Image (tube, rainbow, N blue to C red):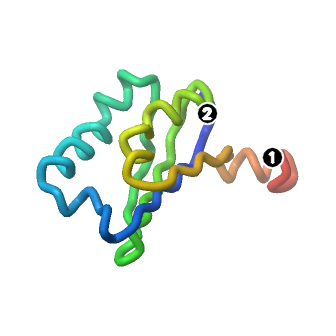
Amino acid sequence: MSLFVVQHRHEATRCPARNPQMAAQLLQHLSAANARQHGLTIHGEAVVNNAHTMYLIVDAPDRDSVGRFMQPFAQAGSVEILDASPCEAVVSRGGCDA
């Protein structure tokens, strides 16, 4: 498994949380059980207030798995998937460079 940080952004006019049906579907999509079915573990998620930006920290087999999982969000805006490491791994290898 690899660690990733995912950033999703959308325009205020396309905010999925404003549509009750879509909002419920997205919450279900982000559930731990659904993420497991896609081979992912979500360690944390947060939406930045007033910024229409969401971040996820996920373990996944690979970047493509994360991309497939994030497809519903890509329909509403951008999705950026970043390779990441736990702080302990960065310290062990002596810096942020992988």
Q: Earlier in the sequence, mark 1 or mark 2?
A: 2
Q: Report the residue marked by disc 2.
A: 63
Give the vertical position of 12 relative to 46 (above or below).
below
Q: Dividing the image into 4 quarters, which one contains the N terminus?
A: top right
Mark 1 Cα shell of 10 Å, populated few (<14), some (14-19), many (≥20): few
Dot 1 lies on which element? helix
**Residue at the bottom extreme?**
50
Residue type at tag 1: Ser
Horizontal and vertical percent position of residue 40: 46, 30
Label 1 and label 2: CA atoms lie apart by 24 Å
Residue that appears at 22% across and 39% down: 28
Q: Report the residue marked by disc 1.
A: 92
Dot 2 lies on which element? helix
**Residue at the left extreme?**
20
> Which of labels 1 and 2 is toward the front?
2
Horizontal and vertical percent position of residue 52: 39, 68
> Total marks drawn?
2
Horizontal and vertical percent position of residue 92: 80, 46
95 left or right, relative to 40: right
Give the vertical position of 98 relative to 67 (above or below).
below
Mark seen at residue 18: none
Residue that appears at 42% across and 40% down: 42
Pick the front one: 72 or 1: 72
Mark 2 Cα shell of 10 Å, populated few (<14), some (14-19), many (≥20): some
Residue type at tag 2: Arg
Horizontal and vertical percent position of residue 41: 44, 34
Q: Dividing the image into 4 quarters, which one contains the C terminus?
A: top right
Residue that appears at 39% across and 60% down: 46
